[in-house]
Image (cartoon, helix red, strand yellow):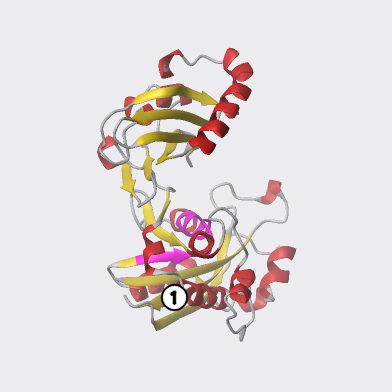
Amino acid sequence: MQYIVLDLEWNQADTPEESVSDIPFEIVEIGAVKLNNDRKMVSEFSELVKPQVYSKLHGITQELIHLQMEQLMSGSPFQGVYSRFRQWCGDDIVFCTWGCQDLTELQRNIRHFGMDPISDGPISYLDVQKLFSIAFEDKKTRRNLEYAIDFLKLDKDIPFHRAFSDAYYTAEILSRIPEDILEFRSYDVFHLPKDREHEIHVRFSTYDKYISRSFDTKEELLEDNEVTSTKCCYCHKNIKRKMKWFTTNGRQFYCLSYCASHGYMKSKLRIRKSEDGRFYAVKTDRFIGPDEISVLRKMQVKSRKLQKSMSWEFLR
């Protein structure tokens, strides 16, 4: 397996009215570093992309990447650059990015220009920004790239905010992430599971994760047995809920279940909208102790006023 550490720079319209709905961010540069299975650098990729959608550089883009439109116009159209990039990537790869946006924007550009998708379902990848937090901080805070480079006391020998340089720095950080942390992969859901058979069920060492197919309505989603089921992370048996599903905002739902063999399990269900306006769910299950149970009970109390105005009978 090889690691493709990817970074993109993109441009956008000056105003919302000028934005093209299916490609709000047009890629203007692709940079990448290829690491072998030992996370050693073996190859590089860097190309400018000739703009075809937005003919003027947004002020923020110009300030960040320090390029002029004339320089970008010397590049090749996206179709050619992306084709060469995919050929360079090869097979048996895992994408790695700093943050969660690059793969989504890459796939938007691929769709806009009528090219074959990377995948027809979710893409498993390494979000190095998240892995840095898990490895070195509190697992929740998301730092910028330069902060992480300074934290690890790495040399800053090339400027930030160009696609190749940011990919290079991300690769430097990735090579220093402990091996056991690499299990915590992320999933890009630009293309959702196409049916129940292809839904994502993945077990990590500390929690389980589930990503559903899409549904026409939120109500239909919440009526699905798999979406609202509570199964023990370890024995995978259906376990009894000690705290029924509740929400504090209509988008995130929580419940508490109990397994006689393994203890109390917290489930968190997030409802999201897909690219085509449908609904899907991301559910995580993990075992918790008394302190977190207490926090969950306080959240439930706060949610009661909201619950009175919504129908939850199908979740009971």
- Is residue 125 shown in magenta? no
Q: Please, is residue 140 above or below residue 31 in the view?
A: above
Span of residues in magenta = 94-108
Task: Determine if residue 57 is in view.
Answer: no
Q: Residue visible at 35% across and 52% down?
A: 205
As rendered, which of 111 and 277 lies closer to the eye?
A: 277
Q: Quadrant of the C terminus?
A: top left
Is 220 left, or right, of 65 in this rendering?
A: left
As rendered, which of 53 and 262 lies closer to the eye?
A: 262
Q: Where is residue 2 shown, x and y percent of the image? A: 33, 72
Q: Residue visible at 37% across and 41% down?
A: 210
Q: Please, is residue 31 above or below residue 118 in the view?
A: below
- Is residue 104 shown in magenta? yes
List the residue tagged with mark 1: 175
What count of labels does the image hold? 1
Q: Where is residue 184 shown, x and y percent of the image? A: 40, 57
Task: Determine if residue 30 is in view.
Answer: yes
As rendered, which of 301 and 109 lies closer to the eye?
A: 301
Q: Quadrant of the N terminus?
A: bottom left
- Binning the other alpha carbons within 10 Å of mark 1 as few (below 14), some (14 to 19) or many (20 upward) gives some
In the rendered structure, which amino acid carries the disc numbered 1? Ser
Helix, strand or loop under label 1: loop
Q: Where is residue 194 shown, x and y percent of the image? A: 32, 40
Is 186 left, or right, of 169 in this rendering?
A: left
Question: Splitting the image into 4 quarters, where does residue 154 fall?
Answer: bottom right
Q: Where is residue 89 shown, x and y percent of the image? A: 35, 72
Q: Please, is residue 259 above or below residue 60 in the view?
A: above
Judged from this view, the residue extending furthest toward the bottom is 157
